[in-house]
Image (spheres, grey):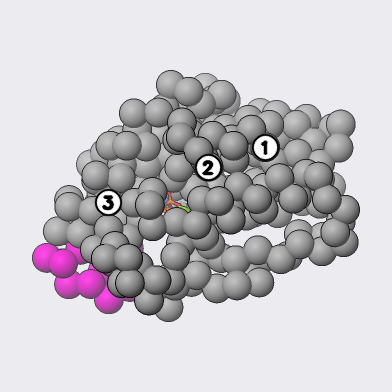
Amino acid sequence: MADMSDLLGRAARLAAGGRAILGVTGAPGAGKSTFAEHLVSGLLERGVAAVRLPMDGFHLADATLASLGLLQRKGSVETFDGYGYCALLHRLLNEADPFVYAPDFDRSLGQPLAGAVTIGPDVQLVVTEGNYLLNPENPWAQARAALAEVWYCRLPDAERQRRLVTRHMRFGKSEEGARSWVSQVDEANAAQVSALESSADLVIDMEALGLPPGRD
Ligand SMILES: Nc1ncnc2c1ncn2[C@@H]1O[C@H](COP(=O)(O)OP(=O)(O)OP(=O)(O)O)[C@@H](O)[C@H]1O
Ligand SMILES: [Mg+2]
């Protein structure tokens, strides 16, 4: 099993020939954002200019989801601007814009926030993380074509669900509301993501890696 130092070395090598994008995926709550943050800070310490780019910034706003009748499915693949995400990834590889601004997802607002991530011209490795990077259908397949590799974060379901419930409660849901959202919404998405694990370039055992919890 690769440790964090091996993973940092492998990530740094991806950008050796010019800017590259590394994808990090896994089921909801598996630790993608936490892992990507650790990876980026470790790369910066090694002198590799890296930035975390969350696919979650491409969540549609609640007002848009409501107009589409999708509010109760927030987090499922059709509730993201997949074409916008795909275009951004290719723009990061092919266009010479000095600064590229990308959205993030603000958990306290529960909404995407435009212009929250800055990707400067010096950035060598973009670490993008989200649920649907291995989805075989377009626009996700076109997005995958922009990624040098995709790494899959694996965490046993019981622990993953426990962390999701805790996080939903921290952001205002009751325990019952959190449990029912996890079992009815998050787990349907988790099943779709987990089915694609074998198409990842690398699978990371998150328990063995043993990272401390990240910020939300
Ligand atoms: N080692 C850990 N021990 C306990 N909790 C953890 C640990 N690592 C991460 N967490 C917590 O688990 C939750 C999920 O982690 P994280 O946000 O990194 O996962 P994610 O895969 O990005 O989730 P999502 O798909 O919902 O964006 C967060 O609240 C995070 O703080
Ligand atoms: Mg996340």
Closer to the camera: disc 2 or disc 1?
2
Give the crowd class for mark 1: few <14, some 14-19, many >=20 residues within 10 Å. Answer: many
Q: Secondary structure at mark 1?
A: loop
Q: Earlier in the sequence, mark 3 or mark 2?
A: 2
Please, what is the three-letter code of the amino acid marked with disc 3? Asp
Is-magenta flag for residue 177? yes
> Looking at the magenta stretch, what is its main secondary structure?
helix
Q: Secondary structure at mark 2?
A: loop
Q: Quadrant of residue 90?
A: top right
Along the line of sight, which residue is nearer the eye, 77 or 44? 77
In the displayed structure, would residue 30 be above or below residue 63?
Answer: above
Q: Which mark is residue 26?
A: none
Q: Which mark is residue 146?
A: 1
Q: Which mark is residue 186?
A: 3
In the displayed structure, would residue 1 be above or below residue 41?
Answer: above
- Which region shows up in magenta? 167-178
The CA distance from mark 1 to mark 3 is: 27 Å
Q: Residue at x 38, y 76 (%)?
A: 63
| Residue 177 on image: x %, y % | 16, 67
Report if the beta carbon of the residue with label 3 is closer than 8 angstroms to ligand 1.
yes
The CA distance from mark 3 to mark 2 is: 22 Å
